[in-house]
Image (spheres, helix red, strand yellow):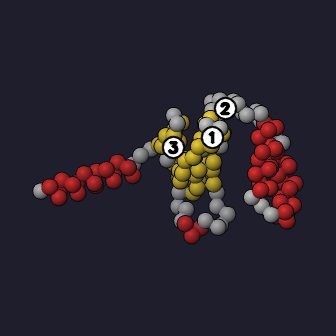
Amino acid sequence: MRKIILVMMFLLIGYSLSTVEAAEIYGETFKEKIERHNTVFALKGLGVKSYLLVKVFVAGFYVEENFQAQDALEDVPKRLEVAYFYKIPGGKLAVETSRRIKLSTNQQEFNQIKDRVNMMKAYFVDLNPGDRYA
């Protein structure tokens, strides 16, 4: 009887976990699934960026609902949703983003995308606590 009760508890726990509709990190909620432009995205991970013990932002990473690990190297639709806790000037963010892209590529790769990186930098705006972008 005890084994049956344990099995039932695990089944109920598994069912409740599979029907969760949102995930939370540092007070920010991210939906488990989002539909945009006829594509259903599933939440695959959450993260936090801290700088000198200050939580700057949290983010949720989404990929297509039917994404499979073997598709990881393919160009598939993705979504990054970011909630900010700290004021960040757009110009500073643009410079830091460009620097990070340059650090994660070799010189030849960066030269190939340099124009696109510079174009992207023009879209950065000042961020304030409470702002949320996707």
State which tag comes first along the sequence, 2 or 3.
Answer: 3
Q: Quadrant of the N terminus?
A: bottom left
Q: How many marks?
A: 3
Frontmost of labels 3 and 1 is 1
Q: Is residue 24 above or below residue 98?
A: above
Extreme residue in the front direction: 52
Q: Which residue is mark 2?
A: 86
State which tag comes first along the sequence, 3 or 1.
Answer: 3
Say which amino acid is labelled 3: Lys
Say which amino acid is labelled 1: Ser
Q: Position of residue 78 (x, y in %)?
A: 63, 54
Q: Position of residue 2 (x, y in %)?
A: 14, 55
Q: Quadrant of the C terminus?
A: top right
Dot 1: element: strand
Say which amino acid is labelled 2: Tyr
State which tag comes first along the sequence, 1 or 2.
Answer: 1
Q: Is residue 73 above or below residue 23?
A: below
91 horizontally vs 55: left or right: right
| Residue found at x 21% / y 54% | 6
Q: Which residue is mark 3?
A: 31
